[in-house]
Image (cartoon, rainbow, N blue to C red):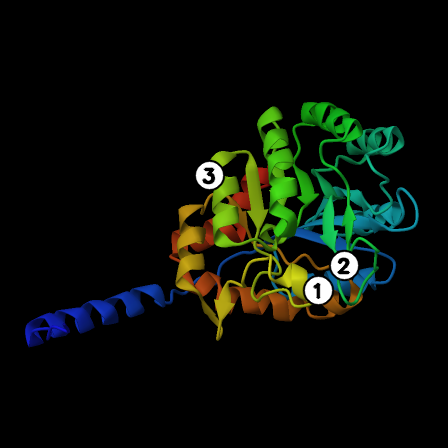
Amino acid sequence: MFKMIPASSKGSLIFLTIIFFITSFKTYSYDGPLFDAMAQIDETVNMKQAIKDVRNASISKIALFARSRKFLGENEKKLIKLQKKNKDLIILGAPKYFLHKKDISKKFTNHTLANVDKYNYAFIGEILFTHADKDHGRQHASGETYLDPSGEGHLNFLKSISRKKIPVMIHWEFYNWDRDFPKFSKIFSQFPEVTFIIPHMGFGSINQIDTILSSHPNVYMTISKSLKKNTSVSKEISLKIGEGMVENKVLKPDWKNLLVKYQNRFMFATDAHKKHRWKKYNKRVKHTRKQVLRFLPNDVAKKIAYKNAEKIYGIKLK
């Protein structure tokens, strides 16, 4: 039988509800430095204009790597020349290679290791492990690009790169969790001396992200491309990836709690890569400031905005 709640109890309940609402959506005033912890570029983008856009967005540093879609090392020298003219801004990473077949080859490993030393790369650009087909990109019969992370070539690469003491970015989308998590988890544990960075939090759910970060202290994530749910994938995969962090231009309370809980493990990044995303660079930065960072306590916002990236890349903002 339904019981009437005393007026005094109702008042307390309403008061607590209001307090929860105000606390959840409290805004702060972070307007400090930003370190774009992950972006990529290729020949389809006007590189000089892209860097102008980065500066116009008041970015202090950007971790940038070339995209090699046609051959190993494509666009590598172009980016190196660009960095020489923008040493105050660009932190170079080893190029991303799109043509891995089943495993990482010795050729890739040797090329990358040699150039880490030659060009003083601060990190390894994305290694493409899992990438669901997007409606604006390449299509596969399997519906994905897939590289098995437990391959012998990849393990040998990690053994070699671990001596360099630089972070390794892995492109892993969490849509096939049961297949992929055990393999990646084993690798994270097998190479505790390697710092792994997962861009855009793998489009994962809060529980998936919590599981990874609580289990593996050597894993970090960027918050790029997570303002809203990714709708460019198939309906089947869309059901298997996490919701966006923002709703009605407000950081969702559960996501806020996650960012606060792992405030030392998240980094701001744009993941600018294709031409259309570079054109929206400034807009993306503004959205992150207004829809994410402003809802975080200032000390947390500073860590995600630039302090964690300073630590990971060993570079202090001036």
Dot 1 surroundings within 10 Å: few (below 14), some, or many (20 or more)? some
Q: Kindly report which numbered mark, 1 or 3, lies closer to the viewer in this rendering.
A: 1
- Assign the N terminus to one quadrant of the image: bottom left
Circle 2 SS class:
loop
The residue indicated by pointer 1 is 234
Q: Which percent across, then down, holds residue 91? A: 70, 45
The residue indicated by pointer 2 is 133
Q: Nearer the viewer, residue 117 or 211?
A: 211
Q: Nearer the viewer, residue 133 or 228?
A: 133
Q: Residue at x 59, y 34 (%)?
A: 185
Q: Amino acid at mark 1?
A: Ser
Circle 1 SS class:
loop
Which of pointers 1 and 3 lies earlier in the amino acid sequence? 3
Image height of 135 relative to 99, above or below: below
Q: Amino acid at mark 2?
A: Asp
The residue indicated by pointer 3 is 214
Q: CA distance from mark 1 to mark 2?
A: 8 Å
Q: Residue at x 80, y 44 (%)?
A: 95
Q: Kindly report which numbered mark, 1 or 2, lies closer to the viewer in this rendering.
A: 1
Which of pointers 2 and 3 lies earlier in the amino acid sequence? 2
Proximity of marks 2 and 3: CB atoms separated by less than 8 Å: no
Residue 254 in sight in this render: yes
Please state if 18 lies on the left or on the right of 109 as rendered: left
Q: Which percent across, then down, holds residue 26? A: 34, 67
Residue 318 in sight in this render: no
Dot 3 surroundings within 10 Å: few (below 14), some, or many (20 or more)? few
Outermost residue to the right:
71
